[in-house]
Image: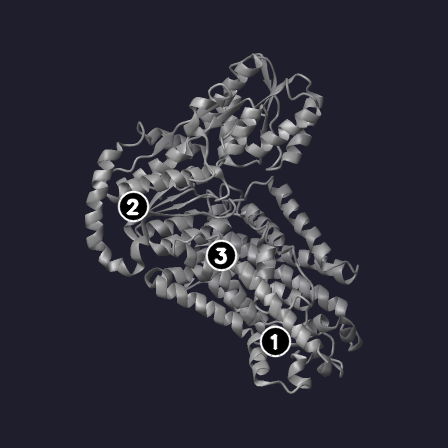
Amino acid sequence: MSSVQNEPPEQAAVSAPPRPAAERSESPTLSEQVSATLFSATSPLWIFLALVVIVAVFSVLKPSAFLSSFDIKTIFINAAVVMMLSVGMTFVIITAGIDLSVGSVLVISGVLAAKVMIAAGGGVAHAAGAGWGAILAGVAVGLIVGVAWGLINGSLIALAGLPPLIVTLGTFGMALGLADVITSGVDVAGIPTKLNSTIGSGQVGPIPWLVLIAAVVTIVCGLVLHLTRFGRYTYAIGSNPEAARRAGINVNLHLIKVYALAGLLSGLGGVLSLAYFTTTTISGHTTDNLTAIAAVVIGGTSLFGGRGTMFGTVVGVFIPVVLASGLVIMSVQSFWQQVVIGAILILAVYFDQLRRRARLRP
Amino acid sequence: MRRGRLTLLAVIAAGAVAGCGSSSSSTTSATGAAATSSASSSSSTTASSGSSSGSKSLALIQGTKADNFYVTMGCGAKSEAAKLGYSINVQGPADFSAPEQIPIVDAVTAQHPGAVLIAPTDTHALIAPMQQMKSAGIKVIQVDTTVSDPSIAVASISSNNVEGGAKAADEMAKLIGGKGSVIVMNEQAGVSTTEARIQGFLQEIKKYPGIKPLATQYVGDNPAKAAQAITAVYAAHPDLAGVFATNVLVAQGVDTGLQTAHAASKIKIIGYDADPTQVADLKSGVVEALIAQEPYQEGVDGVEAAVNALTGKPAQSTLTGLAVLTRSNLASMDQYVYKSSC
């Protein structure tokens, strides 16, 4: 974040972490205080409690299976890739934007990373035994491709002034279409086995590499969001872009950076996905964007921008993954997961609306 | 998915090891009963997780729930499991995709049933999760599709897709009187099961010198694209006499396209699989014939193989049957029509 220009004096006022106006301008009753704490964006406690309840129910009903170290590990692994998309999506939605392209950017990053690994590893016949040189080249290409798509999104949104929904809907189709063009729709397999045996399925002590990488990235991005100027600018732009502009923030540049970050994380998701699945799973990511948006919104981030937390997003990612695993273990139709997630999503947005109304009250 | 992603090799390998089908159910149920008593004594260690884990329980992981092929397979597996005194947990992803299927595979492994029937959605991506399943001591049986590593599953149950394609070719030759151009309309490239069907079709069609096969068209799972493509093909080849459509949506799109071109009556369409929509299409004349698999039998054979594996008997890979459904024989072919619910 050191590359950002010097902080203007007005910045402090603009970039103060947003708080519900009710806390400042009114003398709230006790119940209002309680609900403000429970339902405020800066403390997505109710949704965390929901996760705790879900975990508790499964733990009581099926302790030996649900609480097995194997199941806990696979829950974390299965959350890792979506977590990367959701972390990027958190920044985007806090700017009051949206990024529908994340799943497609993940796919094309994975496809190009795989192609590069195979080419650098000496072709399809030899790539399985390729060393770290080929792998790193592929990883680098995957990340660069992700950033590039993010820059395209950000530039079109910030500079051409197009709506994020339309721009990223367009790049959603373009990225997936190009991935299909490059591969003729056939998944690219035969990537170096070293990539899978380390990042894809290896462990550092008891912790899988996938989980470790996802955790570090999430924590770093959480710190960036909540503690740095980059994060404060993100909130400020989401709250009121005009005020942010007048306060001296280069709004356009910052938006481009935010979408580039989301692209970078999608590219990382593509590389992790490639390492985990050992193939590109082209057709498997068309609803990743909605999964990530749901996770972020369930986590208490407002679609209207300006408020949200990384912790909430983490909880929002885990709820569907935990539900999916627990319901299968209970021999319940796993489709109930979608029903429950849908209900929780609507509830989350309802609470967000309550907050907004409370803030707008005279 | 019914079209699955089998590697051709695996099909042939499965065919080679396949005996003459499933063993008699009376002996299996006898050993099933024996297993009941042994399981009840050994299940004390896993008692807390109830009836869903341990050697008396099975699971079926479908390729996707949204497909009558797998629904029918689930019906067969449930009925056979109930007959043998086993519980079965039937689960499947909403779409035919590895990222959606793998969390289900992991959760089933955590649940730890005795044996699992699985239709892997990807030949590579499912290897590691299925390997974990095997390492956990669970017997793995592949149904319909397979992964590229043949060492994981104790048995594989499927139909022979090359033969299915060949049957379609023979039926086509009969329908069009042995002359004219024919074309294969396929969903997408690289799905090895449908590729095997096409290979079988094109090989067999060579036996009919009057028939000229055109280049295969790939139109995705999309009736609109199929309609567009077939009108273009018909414009270029007015002698077009027959179309082999590899799935239901493609067949419907082809018919729409041919209707627009006023050629529907003279061009014969053969479809693959027999879910209720397709059978309705057969009755109403949209298609002339259907190549039907036996997903119900795949479920039954899968459960039998699982129970054999659990009771220490050899688990046999089997090839299930194929049938050509036409309007004239449909009445007698009830068992081949897929179900939308049990």
Residue in front for this viewpoint, B148 or A242: A242
Give the residue type that dot 1 points to: His
Q: Nearer the viewer, residue A338 or B254?
A: A338
- Please rate how many residues cluster around mark 2, counting C-alpha atoms within 10 Å: few if below 14, some from 14 to 19, many from 20: many
Amino acid type, residue under disc 2 in the picture: Tyr
Kind of element beneath mark 3: helix
- Can you identify the residue that label 1 sits on? A226
Q: Earlier in the sequence, mark 3 or mark 1?
A: 1
Residue B151 in view (yes/no): no
Q: Position of residue A317 (x, y in %)?
A: 53, 63
Asked if B42 appears above or below B144 in the picture, the reply is below
Q: What separation in Å lies between label 2 and label 3 (alpha carbons)?
A: 26 Å
Which residue is at the front of the view, A249 or A162? A162
Q: Which kind of residue does numbered mark 3 sit on?
A: Gln
- Which residue is label 2 attached to? B86
A1, B87: nearer the viewer: B87
Residue density around tag 3, few if under 14, some if 14–19, many if 20 or more, within 10 Å: many
What residue lies at 49% left-to-right and 63% top-to-bottom?
A: A319
Residue A20 picture quarter: bottom right
Please tell me which residue is depicted at 35% across the width and 61% down the height of the picture.
A62
The mark found on residue A337 in the picture is: 3
Q: Name the element at disc 1.
A: helix
Q: CA distance from mark 1 to mark 2?
A: 53 Å
Mark 3 vs mark 1: give the one in front. Answer: 3
